[in-house]
Each structure stands twice: as C-alpha cells, then as structure tokens.
Image (tube, helix red, strand yellow):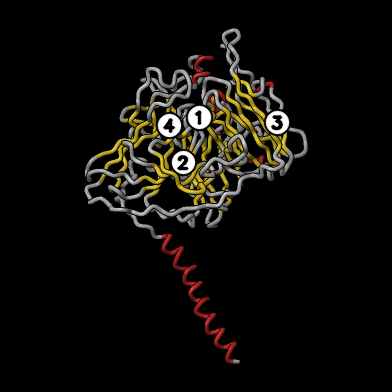
Amino acid sequence: MPVLRSSSLVRLPLVAAALLVTWIAPAAAQTPMRYAPADWDAGVRLAEAPDRNPDPHIVEVDITAKVAEVEVAPGKKARAWTYNGGVPGPLIRTKVGDRLIVHFTNELDAPTTIHWHGVRLNIEMDGVPGISQPEVKKGETFVYDFVVPDASLYWYHPHVMSNAQVGYGLYGALLVEDPADGVGVADTTTFVLSDIGFDSKGTLEDAESGGSAGMVFGREGAYVLVNGRTHPTIKARAGAPQRWRIVNAAKSRFFYLDLDGQQFTVIGQDGGLQEKPESKSILLITPGERYDVIVRPTGKPGTELTLRAMLYNRGYGSVEYRSVEDIMTVALTTEPPVKDAPLPALARTLAPPPLEGATPVSMVLTLPPQEAGHSEFRINGVPYWKAKPFQAKLGETQFWTVKNDTDWDHPYHLHGYFFMVVDEKGVPLAPRVWKDTVNIPMRTTTRLLVTFADRPGTWMIHCHILDHAEGGLMGTVHVGPGEPTEHAHPVPKKP
Ligand code: C2O
Ligand code: CU
C-alpha cells in the first residue's frame, strides 16, 4: 500500500540519522584536541602497574610492599616504605566495570594490608585486619579480586598502623576511567599529593614523634610531594584545558591549592562526576578526598605559574609558624595562547538517598582533656578501642548528623559506600556529588544521607587525619544481619 511504503521511506532516513549520531558522537569524543607538548607531564608522570592479563576487561597486577630508597629532590633520599619501589606506588589504571586482580606480597618487616579507598567492593576485599581479612605478615601474599563499579579516582593504602605506614610512603592511585564520560580533555594527568619526613641520613621520622600532642596536631612531613617529587614542573599551552585528577594521600596535611589566582573548574569528586561543574579560585583537598578539575592556565607564553599550598587553619599548629609552600611550576609554552577553548558542558543526574524514612544517627566527635599526659579522640564518648558498632539494616537509608566538638577539623571517611552531604533539612548541598570523605571543620556539624544498599559487613568510619584515627577517632557500622566482626585494635601505648 502506498501509505505503508511512504511511511517506511520516511522511517529509513531517520534510522540512518540515529545511527550516524550514535556513531559520530563517541568518535568525536574520543579524539579531543591535544594542546600541550607530548612531554608536558613527564616531570610528574606516575609509573603504571603493568596489566599482565590479556582479557580487556580484567586488569591483573602485582603489588609488593617493600623498603626502598626514594629520591624526592636532588640528593634528598629516604629509605621509604613503598609499593613496587616507588612513592607513590604505581598508578593502577582500569575502566569502569573491569575486574581488578591484585597479587599482593608483603616484604616489609611489619604486617600490613591494602585498603581500596572509596571503591564499593565486598567486605572481604576491604583490607581491614580483623574485620575483612587477617593481617598480611612479612613474606605472605594476599589476592585482592573485585570489580570497579564506578568511574572516578580512588587510592590504595594500608589499614594497619595507618598513620605510620601511610606516612612512610605506602599509597598509590587507582584510576577507574569511563571512556564515555564526555569530558573530552586530552591533556589529562593524575596527581598524588602527599608529604614525608626524614632526616639527613634518610631515616624516616618516627610516626609517634611529638607523642600525644603530635597525635592531636596531626603530623606533617617536611617534604611536600607531587607524585613523589618536591616541586616538579609541568608544561601547558596558555589558555588550553588540562584535566587534573588529584588525590590527597597525606596522613594529615590539608592541601589548599592556589594557581596564581586562576580558576579550577571542579567537575567531579570522590564518587565521580558531580551534578554540574563549579568554578573555584582556591581548592581545598583534605586527606582522602579526590578532585577532578579542569584548569586553563593563562599568561604570557614562555612564563611560569606556581601552584601553591596556601595556609589553611585545620586547628592549632597548622598555620602558626608555617609558610605557604610552592608545590609545582606550570611552565607555559611559547606557542600563542589558545583563545576560548571550550569547557565541556557536563551534567549528571544524581538522585540523593531518600530522606523520607531515613533513620537519624547522631555522632559527636570529642577530645576530652588529657589524662596522665595522654589524649584520645572519641566518637559518642568512646575511643575506637572501646566502641560498639553502629548498626544498619541492609537497604536502610540513614541521616547522619556528625557534630565536631573539637578544635581540629576532621575529614570523615566511610568505607564501602558513597554518601551525599545535606543541610539540616536533609536537602543535598549544591552541586550534588557522591562523597566518601568529607571535611567537618572544627566546632561545626555536617549532615549526610547514606543508603546501605547492599554488601553486608562491618565497615569502618574514621577521620582521615590518620594520627587522629589511630588516636581514637574511628568506629564501625555493621550493615546487615549477623554479628559485627570485632576488630582487635591495640590500645595505643601511653607516652
Ligand atoms: Cu583511606 Cu579507612 O581509609
Ligand atoms: Cu581528625
């Protein structure tokens, strides 16, 4: 019939057009413009863990914890604790949905584990001794094997004496890429920010230095590192976009970043892209947090910009007698500036956990006056070694009110689940974004919504100033049926 024929004639070009759109869009997205010279990030580029599995959806790597000499600046060498001989450890690069298998060997003289910070994995792979696995002792191995379900930047570090082991150099980045994220910035690199302390003989600073006061302040190493180097240089073409994926892996230091007053366009945080980009002229990254930002450094070709860590008051001792640190140089190439390089128009729909029916949970963080020269942080009146787990049913949404009644900031971290930070009415702060670590400034209250949708187990919550965590500011939430796993944690010895 003529009617049918004409309708099918009309339909065909539509189908063809739809196919064209589907095919052209990703292809265009895969070839964004490269502006910087090929060696632009050679001064910082992280070693990558070789993938020894030919399956395109499985990444299989070897990670060995061992002592090795690292050189953080010309002639400045330390006998650090490393993954695969480097500080930071190798970048593990995966794609969203991949299976990651890590053959871990411990060649240190101390027990350790690997915790995969931020990854929504099963409790057996969470790397917390006494809860999810035994400690990996000297000479032992453990195989971590899990799927990486969400695109973002994550990181890995031990969960045994974490203030010591992270401070000595044990951390690395785990990048979970989504080739279809639409960001379209070719010049992309990953920055692991940290610090380390050692003396002129290369001996690491004692993790207990300063005793109880050192614990309360949160110890910072004197060498500030970008991908294991002090004050490296990267290159940029003026005006051209670069995507920086940043993790703060320091055990205590906050990074409050300023690039000569230029803008950071934040596109994502801990749990991937945020609802919409947001511009900032100064960027705070507290321990454990990740930021995904686009910068377009401007200036006269051939000149240099400086990335600085500005002073940020996270409590007594963090600004007194301290100075701004120059942490990286951005050298503009001599090519003419790129004019009006577009920023990607990104938007992501993020549905918050349901407020309706959410169980209220209150947590108060305190630091009572010291007794017998000894201080301890507490959650709801108890330090970690006396704490009973918080409880959650599988599928339950909770509305946490976390009140910081101390004079120090606490970057609060929950294992295994993302949460959304909300106001006192439960309305998500804008722009919406998934977090696993949120800074709770001194003497303030932070609220969040979290759904314990799946994966029963006993999950840690703690301050990511790791001196604070080991000083008592840790707890657990037991999700699902069954008895919580008791975490045998040694009571810190009194100084
Ligand atoms: Cu980076 Cu218990 O975590
Ligand atoms: Cu803290």
What's under tag 2, amino acid-wise? Tyr
Whether label 4 lies within 8 Å of ligand 1 gets the answer no
Mark 4 secondary-structure assignment: strand
**Mark 1 is on which residue type?**
Val
Mark 4 → mark 2, Cα distance in angstroms:
11 Å
* The CB of the residue at mark 2 lies under 8 Å from ligand 1: no
Residue in the foreground of this view, choosing between 228 and 385: 385
377 vs 342: above or below: above
Q: CA distance from mark 3 to mark 4?
A: 31 Å
Pointer 4 residue: 255
Give the CA separation, mark 4 to mark 1: 16 Å
| Identity of the residue furthest to the bottom in this view | 1
Q: Is residue 263 left or right of residue 269?
A: left
Q: CA distance from mark 2 to mark 3?
A: 29 Å
The x, y position of residue 208, in whole percent, is 51, 18
Answer with the quarter of the image where residue 190 lies: top left
What residue did someone put label 2 on?
291
Judged from the image, the secondary structure of the residue bearing numbered disc 3 is strand
Tag 3: amino acid: Phe
**Residue tagged by mark 3?**
390
Secondary structure beneath dot 2 equals strand
Q: Earlier in the sequence, mark 1 or mark 2?
A: 1
